[in-house]
Amino acid sequence: MRAERRIAEQRLLGMVDRVTMNLPEQAARFICATCEALNQKGGFVHFYGFLETPNTLLNGHAAFVHAVEECGRKVKKIPHSRQVRATAAYEWQSVIDAWVSEASLLK
């Protein structure tokens, strides 16, 4: 994982305005690298993850927003999210589409 993160940080730093995070079992580990790859004004993040019930999407939104803020950015808007498919008795593969805004002054 370190090599992938290092590549993202070195080669994509501030260069993109859209990121698809379509590996649900690992996507949460790369939120900071994704935030660093977004250009200074921000961009659109398409995040897939495994979320547990109950309140799958509400909890997923809160966890995603918190993780983005921990990385020094802010979620401006979540225009779309949904449960894609059940993957276990109390777990769903879910998708969150979010507009992540410019680097904040939180840190």
Image (cartoon, rainbow, N blue to C red):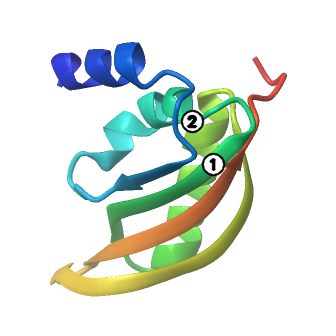
**Mark 1 surroundings within 10 Å by alpha-carbon count, few (fewer than 14), some (14 through 19), many (20 or more):** many
User: Can residue 74 be seen in this snapshot?
Assistant: yes
Residue for point 54% across, 53% down: 63
Q: How many marks?
A: 2
Kind of element beneath mark 2: loop
**Mark 2 surroundings within 10 Å by alpha-carbon count, few (fewer than 14), some (14 through 19), many (20 or more):** many
The numbered dot on residue 38 is 2
Q: Are marks 1 and 2 in contact (CB under 8 Å)?
A: yes
Residue for point 33% across, 36% down: 29
Quarter of the image containing the C terminus?
top right
Q: Quadrant of residue 99?
A: bottom right
In the foreground, 36 or 30? 36
Residue 84 at x, y percent in the picture: 32, 84
In the foreground, 97 or 65? 97
On screen, residue 78 versus residue 85, left or right, reads right
Residue 46 at x, y percent in the picture: 46, 61
The numbered dot on residue 71 is none
Q: Earlier in the sequence, mark 1 or mark 2?
A: 2
Residue 104 at x, y percent in the picture: 80, 29
User: Can residue 55 be seen in this snapshot?
Assistant: no
On screen, residue 44 versus residue 4, left or right, reads right
Residue at mark 1 to residue at mark 2: CA–CA distance: 6 Å
The numbered dot on residue 43 is 1
The three-letter code of the residue at mark 2 reads Leu
The three-letter code of the residue at mark 1 reads Gly
Quarter of the image containing the N terminus?
top left
Residue for point 36% across, 67% down: 51
Q: Quadrant of residue 80?
A: bottom right
Q: Is residue 12 above or below residue 64?
A: above
In the foreground, 51 or 77? 77
